[in-house]
Amino acid sequence: MSTHPLDDFAHGLPKAELHIHIEGSLEPELIFALGQRNQIELPYPDVESLRAAYAFTNLQSFLDIYYAGASVLITEQDFFDMAWAYFLRAKADNVIHAELFFDPQTHTERGIGFDTVINGLTRACQQAREQLGIRAELIMCFLRHLSEEEAFETLEQAKPHLGKFIGIGLDSSEVGHPPEKFARVFAEARKLGLRVVAHAGEEGPPEYIWSALDVLKVERIDHGVQSLKDQKLVERLVKERIPLTVCPLSNIKLCVFPDLGQHNLKQMLDLGIVATVNSDDPAYFGGYMNQNFHQPRAALDLDREHLKQLAANSFEASFATPEEKRAYGDRLEAYCAG
């Protein structure tokens, strides 16, 4: 832990994580352990070689290695073990509410049953609630580089499991795959009572954020860092309290910003945008939740109020019940007053 007093403060803040791809929490050590357990040979001789390959120049170069890493996930126990490893890290970072993205198409395309994926993850979520005190939920993402038809097929596979996940999202390669491509499947999901979010404005333009809001009718935007290029969009985000789930270290690793000192997170907070910080794919981007507080704090000179606001925003932006949100807010106030 950092010795800076504000980093100590941030470390202890109760917080929610709303933008975590559970497959992106698969550390090289666990990839090799699962590969060995499932007798899968990896194209890297050892953990160090695999970690050294985590040098990305853009979103696609990351996705290529991300899908390769996911190939070791075969059994329900594998999915449980992956999620449980994340929850232990989240607990250490004082995450008390987590909404996990999972990508069933990454696995069903490989012949892994939808049931295998969701049952392993659900069991880990239940155990996180019981043993760690983390309120954990699942959000099923569609891969936007695949077709609308394939997204509909995935939604059909998910219907018998509707009680196990709370919403849908949209991830993978953004550029060239606008939100409009999935308008009908999102409309169907909303009819089923599912919450809706989407990645927009990470590498894609502000227009993708408008489309996610107006066409997909999402309740929050994942990433959204390009929104500051459009003043009218900023005004709407502030007025309607539309949250952004920002992932600072991910943005730097994927070259969305040249360095953390040029990230627009502080600007978002000062404008009144409901910005949150999250770890995205922490095994690949070098930072779980608290690193995503500590490093921007130093680079952007965030103060105590900024840090508290990020935690408060994370609860406001969550899909927790109003009662849970009040309890989270009380917990945050008690911590800050202590």
Image (tube, grey):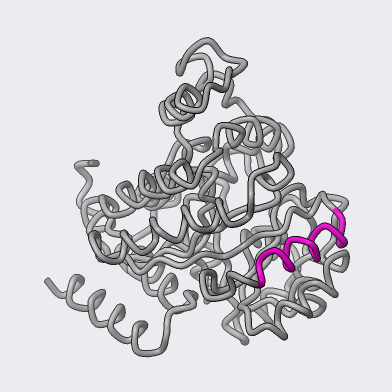
Tell me the residue at 85%/61% (across/down).
Answer: 178
Q: Is residue 51 visible?
A: yes
Q: Between residues 192 and 142, which one lies in front from this camera angle?
A: 192
In this picture, is 60 found above or below 50?
A: below
In this picture, is 213 found above or below 106?
A: below
Identify the magenta region. 147-159
In this picture, is 5 found above or below 60?
A: below
Tell me the residue at 71%/36% (across/down).
Answer: 58
Q: Looking at the image, which residue sits at the far top?
A: 45
Asked if the magenta segment contains residue 300, the reply would be: no
Spot occupied by residue 192 in the image (x, y as percentages of width and height)? 68, 83
Secondary structure mostly taken by the magenta-highlighted segment of the chain: helix
Spot occupied by residue 114 in the image (x, y as percentages of width and height)? 63, 55
Q: Between residues 118 and 289, which one lies in front from this camera angle?
A: 118
Q: Is residue 184 left or right of residue 32?
A: right
Tell me the residue at 70%/39% (across/down).
Answer: 110
Quarter of the image holding residue 130?
bottom left
In this picture, is 34 found above or below 100?
A: above
Image quadrant for the N terminus?
Answer: top left
Asked if the magenta segment contains residue 153, the reply would be: yes
Spot occupied by residue 20 in the image (x, y as percentages of width and height)? 51, 54
